[in-house]
Image (cartoon, rainbow, N blue to C red):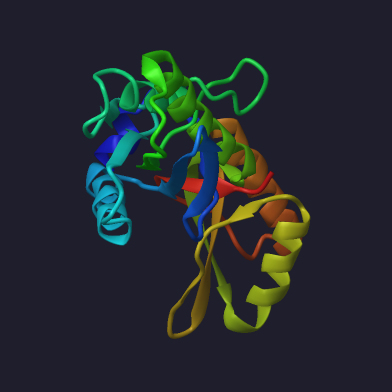
Amino acid sequence: MAEEEESRATAYTTLAPGHDFRHELEIKRSRFITVLRRASDEGAARALVAEQRKEFHDARHHCSAFVIGPDRLIQRSSDDGEPSGTAGIPMLEALIKRETLPGVTDLSDVSAVVVRYFGGILLGAGGLVRAYSESVSAALDSAPLVQRHRLRICDVAVPHHAAGRLENDLRSAGYVMAETSYGPTETILRLALPDGASAIADAGERLASMTSGASGLQPQGTEWVDVPG
């Protein structure tokens, strides 16, 4: 894929797959409901905004921010009626400045919406900035994260009867496995390896040892794969 070839990044952090993540804060009687969703493109990110407008149709504001792509080239935000610069930008900064490891800020493919129910007490510009930033940060504190790595996919063709045992052996050896496919006479196991000649050579030698030379690696393209921590 073009994105994989052009990306300078080889890894980044995103939300773990699954349901949306929600968190609520109350500040001076205003309710701030934050919804986070993993989103791989701008359309998916904007879909979250539309859904929250529908679900919380009686709320005054549905502010949003999202960052997309391994290199985080797509960054958008919206104040949705709050004073300019007091909601969307603080939310976006909470995403892009989030440390996923000490000194590492690589969070991406995340869409955030903060729904505000006004409580009757004005917060002022500074108060709004803090509230929207804190809302996203607090939601991220409770949301599980996962690293995605750009990995080289290598196919391994094995007879059906040997596939299960070999897959277990490869997993036990620490290899990341991508989706398995099945042919008429063979099972295609797919290893996800670091994209480098030495890693592929080492895996080929390990595979040859496991199968007494009966199976070899067939390098394919690269894919972004969630890697367990």
Foreground residue among 220 and 78: 78
> x%, y% of residue 35?
44, 48
Direction from residue 49 to residue 159 in the image, left or right: right
Q: Nearer the viewer, residue 152 or 110?
A: 110
Picture quadrant of residue 139: top right
Location of the C terminus by quadrant is top right
Q: How many marks?
A: 0
Q: Residue at x 53, y 28 (%)?
A: 134
Q: Is 190 on the left-hand or right-hand side of 47? A: right
Residue 70 higher or lower than 113, as above or below? above
| Residue 203 place in picture, x, y as percent | 65, 46
Between 6 and 31, the residue placed more toward the observer is: 31
Visible residue check, residue 205 = yes
In the displayed image of the protein, which residue is found farthest to the front? 120
Q: Establish if 82 lies above or below 47.
A: above
Residue at 26% x, 56% y is 57
**Image quarter hosting the N terminus:** top left
Q: Give me the residue at 65% from left, 48% from top.
A: 228
55 over 6 or under it: above or below:
below
- Residue 194 position within the rendered picture, expressed as x and y whole percent measured from the top left: 56, 37
Apparent side of residue 203 relative to residue 63 in the rendered image (left or right): right
Residue displayed at 68% across by 55% down = 208
Q: Quadrant of residue 121?
A: top left
Q: Position of residue 151 (x, y in %)?
A: 50, 42
Could one spot residue 68 in this view of the protein?
Answer: no
| Image vertical order of residue 95 relative to residue 223, above or below | above
